[in-house]
Amino acid sequence: MTRPVLLQLVPLADHPALQRVDEHYERVQVSDPGQLPSGLARRVQIILASAMTPITAALMDQLPALKAICSIGVGYDAIDRRHAHQRGIAVSNTPDVLNDCVADMAWALMLDTARRVSEADRYVRAGQWRQANSFPLAMRVSGKKLGIVGLGRIGQVIARRAGGFDMELRYHNRRPRKDVDWHYEPSLIELAHWADILVIAAVGGDETRGLINRAVMDALGPQGILINISRGSVVDERALVKALQEGRLGGAGLDVFESEPGVPEELARLDQAVLTPHVASATRETRDAMLRLTLDNILHFQRTGSLLTPVAFHE
Ligand code: 8YV
């Protein structure tokens, strides 16, 4: 009997659960789904992708038998969920299993940017320490004011870690959360004004595009630090480069960018920016857990027709 096709749009590490998936599906890996022969395209029931793989309406419509999109990652802004919903295609992501590592990375970027760790490393390697002991002073982190934009699952883990640094904490969200005691700040500008460090942990997509604009950066100010571990689209990157160049913003720690893997050259030239290549979830443990949850979603869907961690769609 011919098995339905599982279209794999990303390279995968080896995982024991893959064998079980392969018993039920013919796994076809392509990097450009446009290259898929129409005979195979007609048999695709599942797409296996990463959170950064664009899943457009056009791609879905190339696949008439598509039933589920299983994405490795928590963000779903790359998926046209409205179209999936209209076609009755289920969508899953990998919530919770990456919270700790993404939160850890937010802290790594905070400490690095404030304490100039990467810059200090470059200074030592370049032999500058031997020439003159002139490394600039950094900013203290402990005891400072931390603002979090987006207090979802990851935002809350970042917030919990702030206790260890004796920091005051406030957050901005679409709505105040009833299940936490942290101070809610209804105005993003006011939060930026109050905070020494502002961490962006909001969802990506149209509702947050360009949310962190010049006015927010100016409110954060010349000593302020901006950290982004969510999506590059949330920050106006041109405004950020200008704010850093003109000294209107103190520093930025960024794991995500507007046009990944593209990073503006001007940004890469700035010592007060710490840049990492979208690796917040990229530890062996967490990537393994993300893949496992995705494969579990696929196997559950094969057995029951529903997903373990579906992404709900609201009009
Ligand atoms: C990864 C992410 O880059 O979870 C997300 O939304 O952006 C990241 O964890 C990606 O999904 C890896 O596959």
Image: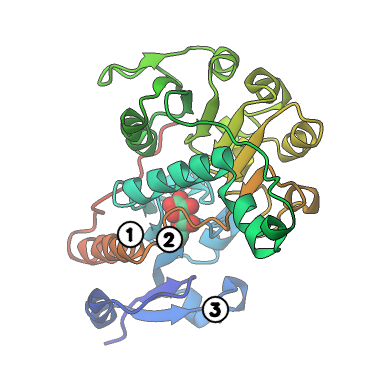
Image disc number at residue 199: none
Q: Which residue is mark 3?
A: 38
Dot 1 and dot 2 residues touching (CB under 8 Å): yes
Which residue is depicted at the point 71% across and 45% down?
A: 134
Which residue is depicted at the point 48% across and 37% down?
A: 203
- Of circles 2 and 3, the one toward us is 2
Q: Earlier in the sequence, mark 3 or mark 1?
A: 3
Residue 3 lies, in percent from the top left, at: 31, 81
Image disc number at residue 282: 2
Does the Cβ of the disc 2 residue fall within 8 Å of ligand 1? yes
Q: Residues within 10 Å of mark 2 (few under 14, many from 20)?
A: some
Q: Residues within 10 Å of mark 1 (few under 14, many from 20)?
A: some
**Position of 39 relative to 67 (above/below):** below
Q: Quick one: quadrant of the C terminus? A: top left
Q: Which residue is mark 1?
A: 286
Instruction: Answer with the quarter of the image where residue 56 lies.
Output: bottom right
Question: What is the three-letter code of the residue carrying label 1?
Answer: Thr
Asked if residue 229 can be seen in this view, the reply is no
Is 130 on the left or on the right of 277, as rendered?
A: right
For the residue pair 175 and 182, the one nearer the viewer reads as 182
Q: Residue furthest bottom?
A: 1
Question: Distance of mark 2 from mark 3, alpha carbons?
Answer: 35 Å
Question: What is the three-letter code of the residue carrying label 2?
Answer: Ala
